[in-house]
């Protein structure tokens, strides 16, 4: 249902069906249908946002319509296109060609659909034309092929900073930012800085096809990297990437990159930088000079053009700055936790075995089910850490969690005997998350009620020596009194206690001085 949400949002921003089609890759007819349904529902954008995917689907598609496969003959658009090329001489029109088509195909397409298919055909012919940029509409972004060396003063190593360049289509007003890499986090951070530099947001951003922005861009459609899509949803910007290996789709970016390489980066050829921040400070000084430089054939600077053309038509910045997030689909384990970078986070237990969407930043983890937020956790960093919320547990587990804690379990084991304490410490040491051990510990210590404290102590002494930890095995030791077989071999219990005095979980008298 993501496409429905995006189409409705772009429609509310006043974008045309064609522009929404370009941004989402959804057919114009489908875009028009979704907009029509949205208007009929009479819902606001805020109401749409709070609906989960199931509720939204029920609102937009209450009935499943049957799919009708068209059997109409497709016009020969190669012939039609060639005929139209001669229209100055022959005076032929598209309407006349449609009439001729209908004579041969009475059940063929009507004129409106005929025109739609012809326009699609013409788009595939890839004509080259001069682009006209509307004020405040497009921003072109790219990386310079020329990088800048950064010298590490401590190690002497040299790393190369990447140069991000953004150019507004109408004015050519330019932003430049150096980052350690072209990785997604750096790429998105450059966009945030860029929008702040412009003091507003364009309607469309045209990136190149680097993986930090676009996963795929081919005849099957455009797939935008989810983190990049989230950034542009936050700012209300449409992503319309250039076609692969088609530099004419982004001439402003190509020209901007070349100009920055010559005007700014070339001036640094004899300068040694020791940090990316130092490089950005040097870039900022020259960038103002570049934007204020008079363009000869226009007799105006880029700054003047920006103030006249782009600035008045940029959308305002959101109230809150964007926080970088990553996205992942995670399956809920049987213990109602999901795993994220070797850390575990709980969700309500009813979602066991479900696939959930995880959105996480450097500080927080947000877990969604069908676009509805179901859990929030602070971001964990240590491998094996676990964040479990009490309300996510089944009622039985909530009771155990409330009644059990490591201190209480250790106190119970100490009242039974020394080997019970040792055994409990061994179990705690074998798990990453203490509550995972409670059920096993309770099952074993409860055997003292059936067999007595002394018998359980002897059984755990035997189990520890033979590295046996399962509840079933310890119950078998008690039933068969296996610990007596060692006594029959003239091994006194006292010698066993002496043997275990060296166990890592037993503290001697020196600990309490």
Image (cartoon, helix red, strand yellow):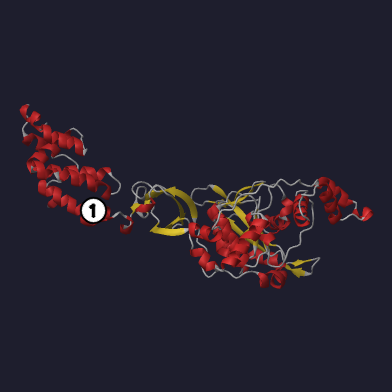
Quadrant housing the N terminus: bottom right
Local crowd at mark 1 within 10 Å, few (<14), some, or many (≥20)?
few
**Can residue 77 be seen in the rendering of this structure?**
yes
Identify the residue shown where x is 8% and y is 43%.
453
**Can residue 205 be seen in the rendering of this structure?**
no
Identify the residue shown where x is 62% and y is 67%.
13
Q: Where is residue 111 in the image (x, y as percent from the top left)?
A: 78, 56
172 lies left or right of 335: right
Residue linked to disc 1 = 400
Per the image, label 1 sits on a secondary structure element best described as helix
In the image, farthest residue toward the top: 489
166 lies left or right of 42: right
Identify the residue shown where x is 59% and y is 54%.
272
457 lies left or right of 112: left
How many marks overall?
1
Near-viewer residue (250 or 291): 250
Q: Position of residue 64 (x, y in %)?
A: 56, 53
Q: Position of residue 38 (x, y in %)?
A: 59, 64
Near-viewer residue (210 or 374): 374
Identify the residue shown where x is 36% and y is 53%.
350
385 lies left or right of 319: left
Q: Position of residue 43 (x, y in %)?
A: 55, 68
Determine whether 489 is above or below 6 in the image: above
In the image, farthest residue toward the right: 89
């Amino acid at each position: 249902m993501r496409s429905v949400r995006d189409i409705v949002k772009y429609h509310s921003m006043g974008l045309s069906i064609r522009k929404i089609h370009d941004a989402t890759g959804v057919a114009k007819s489908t875009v028009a249908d979704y907009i029509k349904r949205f208007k009929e529902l009479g819902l606001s954008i805020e109401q749409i946002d709070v609906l989960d995917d199931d509720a939204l689907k029920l609102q937009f598609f209450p009935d499943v319509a049957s799919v009708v496969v068209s059997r109409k003959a497709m016009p020969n658009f190669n012939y039609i296109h060639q005929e139209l090329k001669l229209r100055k001489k022959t005076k032929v029109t598209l309407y006349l060609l449609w009439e001729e088509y209908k004579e041969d195909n009475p059940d063929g397409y009507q004129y409106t659909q005929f025109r739609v298919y012809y326009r699609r055909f013409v788009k595939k012919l890839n004509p080259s034309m001069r682009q006209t940029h509307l004020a405040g509409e497009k921003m072109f972004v790219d990386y310079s092929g020329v990088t800048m060396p950064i010298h590490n003063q401590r190690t002497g190593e040299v790393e190369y900073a990447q140069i991000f360049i953004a150019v507004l289509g109408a004015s050519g007003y330019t932003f430049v930012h150096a980052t350690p890499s072209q990785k997604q986090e750096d790429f998105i951070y450059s966009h945030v800085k860029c929008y702040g530099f412009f003091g507003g947001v364009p309607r469309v951003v045209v990136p190149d096809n680097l993986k930090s922005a676009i996963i795929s861009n081919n005849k099957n459609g455009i797939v935008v990297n989810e983190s990049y899509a989230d950034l542009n949803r936050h700012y209300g910007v449409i992503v319309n990437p250039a076609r692969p290996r088609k530099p004419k789709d982004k001439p402003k970016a190509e020209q901007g990159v070349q100009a920055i390489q010559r005007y700014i980066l070339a001036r640094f050829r004899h300068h040694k930088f020791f940090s990316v921040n130092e490089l950005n400070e040097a870039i900022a000084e020259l960038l103002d000079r570049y934007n204020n430089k008079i363009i000869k054939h226009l007799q105006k600077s880029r700054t003047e053009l920006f103030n006249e053309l782009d600035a008045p038509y940029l959308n305002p910045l959101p109230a809150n700055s964007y926080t970088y997030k990553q996205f992942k689909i995670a399956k809920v384990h049987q213990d109602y936790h999901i795993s994220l970078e070797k850390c575990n986070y709980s969700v309500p237990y009813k979602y066991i075995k479900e696939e959930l969407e995880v959105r996480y930043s450097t500080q927080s983890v947000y877990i969604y089910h069908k676009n509805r937020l179901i859990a929030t956790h602070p971001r964990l960093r240590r491998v094996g850490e676990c964040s479990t919320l009490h309300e996510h547990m089944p009622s039985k587990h909530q009771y155990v969690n409330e009644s059990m804690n490591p201190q209480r379990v250790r106190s119970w084991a100490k009242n039974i005997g020394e080997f019970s304490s040792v055994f409990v410490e061994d179990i705690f040491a074998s798990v990453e998350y203490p509550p995972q051990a409670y059920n096993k510990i309770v099952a074993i210590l409860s055997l003292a009620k059936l067999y007595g404290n002394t018998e359980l102590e002897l059984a755990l002494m035997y189990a520890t020596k033979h590295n046996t930890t399962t509840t079933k095995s310890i119950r078998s030791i008690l039933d068969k009194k296996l610990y007596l077989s060692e006594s029959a071999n003239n091994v006194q219990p006292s010698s066993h206690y002496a043997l275990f005095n060296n166990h890592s979980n037993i503290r001697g008298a020196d600990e309490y001085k």
